[in-house]
Image (cartoon, helix red, strand yellow):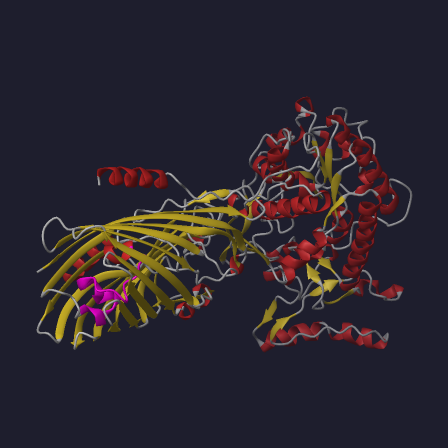
């Protein structure tokens, strides 16, 4: 039953491709509205993801938050030296987060969060020109993170969370054999990691946050590989096979600062460093017919830095506007760019609106619009070249209650 | 508050309608006129594949793929003298006369030892000879004029030959007046604006694929005899029809799986008794060679052994001519046409020398190579002299055998069946191989004329059909 529940969650959590490899930073709609900045901010229980250090600075004793986003992502492609064009018809991604936190005393706050920090799906048409590379892919990871945070004299917050991560993926691609031959790989596993954060309240106007989330490798050890091939090849390639593969979820280091410039206006800045260089090669090792099937597929990702700037403007006690912009430098390599993850250099802006209809209840609307900038890219091992561009819209809704 | 909401919502609606668009490439002809595209060539450009000429093979022929790509830059219709059959026809000369066969397909066949394996088998066993005869010889001339006038088996010297259609039914079937017509005159009938001319492979291949039995076309000699004069006359004629075009050079014909699939040493001996019996039988041969101061020796050992082959070029004095056989060398090619059962069960290569026509010896290979080199320098010079684009087939085929070529996830090599480049006859292109060649030709045209003809997707073409 538990497995089934997890499976259901994964289906619901199906998220979509956009920028920055396959990372999804939609872990709180207030933070999403302000340029996905959260490390130097005190936004209640969603700090479990953004900075466990600031969790203990929440004003009241309890804070609960649920949120979801809908990802509408489209990537367009034109083949090199060709008028051929293709477009993804991705399913709508719906990342989701749930947090709860409570103060035990002035010093200690504890909480738990369930969120989806990584995910990607790309669905190209089944007859598209790159179908021997990928037809469709979806990968998801969801994290469960119990967290403890210490508030030291209302100046310094230190927090740590233990992460239990579950990841799954499915990949379908065509094979160059007659009869629309194809391969389907799917699998999943779980692993553990941690999230630690430091929060400093430097005077009345300035806050600083630091956060580190560890690398987690999803090790698929018993994935299912199904091959749909001409019968004459079945003696060489088993139609039902098992495979092993590692999918790295990189570590993140975030540093942010917020400055309250007036009673109503706050500015926030953040820098994220993501250790994407861990995603160097996607390897598949098969249980049977390994000599023929085993593959090492270079990805050669590089670490990425994302600068963010955001503004929060409290029109009144009950209405708060937010906005932000950031530039997400793609970690993908221009020569090893696989259409499974259309990760381009991305410019994005965000908008947010929080309304407090009754004391303690906040309705948070967010809107994120990403523009994956047009670039020529090649996947050298398959000599597949073309120009990509993507546009993504992500409206989001969150509800939080504190008392 | 309400106004702000309305503005926000309309903004969102506006934004959602915005889609990514990539439109980097604009097809362009750069003033080239592709409206009437004429093709003159041999089996390779006719779409001959799987050892026969058949309808879908003609559709997948790379000139037709090029013509489809030309349509984005002002290209017109591309009329092909289609065969009336999908099974295909090929006339074969045998000792009993002409035998018509269909195309090949990959299927299961059982050898003389009772082992079943995947190999090319006839699409139709024992086909109705009358039916195939009709399909090949029924004239389609009334459907002309044709853009693709490529004729299988055509060499350079055939182009100016009056009545070629009587000798070659692949031409006779679309020639208006077979006893009088010359193939070189065919492209003029569509008043071409752009042409592709690819002749020369058969001038070397006829020799190579017959194990050196048929002659190579000599380099020098008058029009209709020598390659140089005839080629230049042909190109001058083509240029008189249309002054812009593409010509192709001759690939290294021995790189095709037809030559590289059967090893020179397929004889596997597992018992010492067999080895001793064979060596005993050849003891006299070895003594004779030693007595005449010749280096040839035949020796068998346990494991893999080179086959004993006929070699008509062995320098043996007159009384010993029946001894013109020896063991094959590593750099010699055994042709795919060799009856495999004769090796396995008929004593070929051990007790009986493999007949000359199934082996391209070292000397014959050198002859082919020097002929191809000579043809290609003539073709290169013609491209320069007549200011035409050049399709470097030699380099393309060389790359497939040396490193392989990868395109959109398909690896093109010179391997038989698995190499994606060739059809089941091991000599002619597969549909994907045709698509690859079409792209190389388009690149050659774009490079020469500054045009922007879009490339095709090789993955739009089917892989070899496997059971």
Tell me: A18 left or right of B206: left
Q: Is residue A54 magenta?
A: yes
- The quarter of the image holding the N terminus of chain A is bottom left
Q: Is residue B7 visible?
A: yes
Q: Position of residue B44 (x, y in %)?
A: 67, 43
Looking at the image, the residue that sits furthest to the right is: B222
Tell me: B51 left or right of B253: left
Residue drawn at (78%, 56%) of the image = B368
Front in this rendered view, residue B93 or B322:
B93
What span is colored magenta in the figure? Answer: A34-55
Q: Is residue B153 magenta?
A: no
- The quarter of the image holding the C terminus of chain A is bottom left
Looking at the image, the residue that sits furthest to the top is: B142
| Number of numbered discs on residues | 0
Front in this rendered view, residue B217 or A117:
A117
Q: Is residue A135 visible?
A: no
Q: Position of residue B82 (x, y in %)?
A: 62, 31
In this rendering, the answer to whether B144 lies above or below A12 is: above
Residue drawn at (34%, 60%) of the image = A23
Tell me: A126 left or right of A49: right
Front in this rendered view, residue B265 or B288:
B265
In this rendering, the answer to whether B332 lies above or below B279 is: above
Q: Where on the picture, by quarter, is residue A87?
A: top left
In this rendering, the answer to whether B2 lies above or below B300 is: above
Residue drawn at (85%, 46%) of the image = B227
Q: Position of residue A275 (x, y in %)?
A: 39, 70
In this rendering, the answer to whether A45 lies above or below A74 is: below
Q: Position of residue A286 (x, y in %)?
A: 38, 66
Q: Where on the picture, by quarter, is residue B197?
A: top right
């Amino acid at each position: 039953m538990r497995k089934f529940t997890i499976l259901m969650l994964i289906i619901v959590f199906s998220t979509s491709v956009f920028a920055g490899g396959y990372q999804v930073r939609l872990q709180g709609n207030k933070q999403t509205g302000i340029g996905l900045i959260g490390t130097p901010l005190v936004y209640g229980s969603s700090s479990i993801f953004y900075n466990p250090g600031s969790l203990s600075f929440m004003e009241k004793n309890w804070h609960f938050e649920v949120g979801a986003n809908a990802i509408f992502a489209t990537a367009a492609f034109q083949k090199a030296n060709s008028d051929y064009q293709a477009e993804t018809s991705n399913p709508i991604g719906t990342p989701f987060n749930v947090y709860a936190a409570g103060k035990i005393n002035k010093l200690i706050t504890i909480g738990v969060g369930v969120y989806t920090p990584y995910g990607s799906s790309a669905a190209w048409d089944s007859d598209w020109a790159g179908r021997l590379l990928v037809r469709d892919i979806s990968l998801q990871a969801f994290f469960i993170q119990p967290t403890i945070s210490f508030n030291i004299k209302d100046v310094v917050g230190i927090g740590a969370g233990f992460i239990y991560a579950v990841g799954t993926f499915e990949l379908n691609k065509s094979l160059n054999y007659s009869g629309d031959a194809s391969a389907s790989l799917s699998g999943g596993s779980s692993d553990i990691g941690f999230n630690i954060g430091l929060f400093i309240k430097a005077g009345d106007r300035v806050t600083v946050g630091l956060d580190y989330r560890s690398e987690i490798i999803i090790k698929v050890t018993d994935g299912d590989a199904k091959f749909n091939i001409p019968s004459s090849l079945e003696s060489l390639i088993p139609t039902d096979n098992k495979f092993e593969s590692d999918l790295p979820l990189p570590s993140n280091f975030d540093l942010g600062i917020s400055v309250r410039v007036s009673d109503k206006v706050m500015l926030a800045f953040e820098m994220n460093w993501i250790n994407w260089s861990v995603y160097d090669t996607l390897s598949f090792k098969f249980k049977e017919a390994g000599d023929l099937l085993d593959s090492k597929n270079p990805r050669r990702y590089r670490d990425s830095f994302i600068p963010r700037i955001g503004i929060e403007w409290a029109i009144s006690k009950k209405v708060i506007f937010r906005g932000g912009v950031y530039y997400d430098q793609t970690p993908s390599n221009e020569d090893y760019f696989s259409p499974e993850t259309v990760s381009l250099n991305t410019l994005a802006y965000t908008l947010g609106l929080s309304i407090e209809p009754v004391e303690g209840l906040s309705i948070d609307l967010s809107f994120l619009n990403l523009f994956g900038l047009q670039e020529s890219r090649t996947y050298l091992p398959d000599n597949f070249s073309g120009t990509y561009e993507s546009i993504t819209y992500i409206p989001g809704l969150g509800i939080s209650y504190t008392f | 508050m309400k106004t702000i909401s309305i503005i926000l919502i309309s903004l969102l609606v506006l934004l959602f309608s915005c889609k990514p668009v990539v439109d980097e490439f604009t097809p362009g002809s750069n003033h080239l006129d592709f409206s009437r595209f004429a093709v003159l060539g041999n089996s390779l450009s006719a779409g001959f594949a799987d050892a026969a000429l058949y309808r879908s093979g003609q559709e997948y022929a790379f000139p037709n793929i090029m013509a489809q790509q030309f349509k984005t830059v002002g290209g017109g219709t591309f009329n092909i003298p289609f065969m009336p059959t999908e099974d295909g026809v090929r006339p074969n000369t045998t000792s009993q006369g002409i035998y018509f066969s269909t195309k090949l397909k990959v299927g299961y066949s059982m050898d003389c030892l009772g082992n079943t394996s995947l190999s090319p088998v006839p699409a139709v066993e024992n086909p109705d000879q009358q039916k195939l005869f009709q399909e090949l010889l029924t004239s389609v001339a009334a459907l002309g004029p044709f853009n693709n006038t490529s004729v299988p088996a055509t060499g350079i010297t055939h182009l100016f030959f009056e009545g070629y259609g009587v000798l070659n039914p692949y031409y006779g079937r679309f020639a208006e007046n077979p006893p009088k017509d010359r193939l070189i005159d065919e492209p003029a009938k569509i008043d071409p604006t752009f042409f592709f001319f690819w002749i020369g492979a058969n001038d070397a291949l006829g020799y190579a694929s017959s194990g050196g039995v048929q002659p190579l076309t000599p380099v020098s000699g008058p029009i209709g005899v020598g390659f140089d004069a005839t080629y230049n006359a042909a190109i001058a004629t083509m240029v008189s029809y249309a002054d812009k075009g593409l010509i192709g050079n001759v690939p290294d014909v021995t790189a095709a799986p037809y030559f590289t699939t059967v090893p020179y040493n397929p004889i596997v001996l597992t018992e010492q008794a067999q080895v001793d019996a064979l060596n005993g039988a050849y003891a006299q041969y070895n003594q004779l060679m030693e007595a005449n101061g010749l280096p040839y020796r035949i020796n068998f050992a346990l494991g893999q052994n080179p086959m004993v082959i006929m070699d008509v070029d062995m320098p043996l004095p007159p009384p010993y001519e029946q001894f013109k056989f020896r063991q094959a060398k590593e750099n010699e090619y055994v042709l795919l046409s060799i009856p495999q059962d004769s090796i396995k069960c008929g004593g070929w290569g051990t007790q009986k020398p493999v007949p000359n026509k199934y082996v391209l010896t070292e000397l014959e290979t050198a002859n082919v190579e020097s002929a191809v080199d000579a043809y290609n320098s003539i073709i290169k010079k013609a491209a320069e002299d007549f200011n035409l684009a050049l399709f470097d087939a030699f380099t393309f085929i060389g790359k497939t055998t040396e490193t392989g070529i990868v395109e959109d996830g398909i690896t093109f090599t010179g391997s038989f069946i698995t190499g994606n480049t060739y059809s089941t006859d091991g000599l002619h292109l597969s549909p994907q191989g045709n698509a690859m060649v079409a792209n190389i030709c388009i690149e050659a045209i774009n490079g020469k004329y500054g045009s922007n003809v879009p490339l095709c997707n090789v993955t739009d073409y089917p892989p070899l059909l496997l059971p």
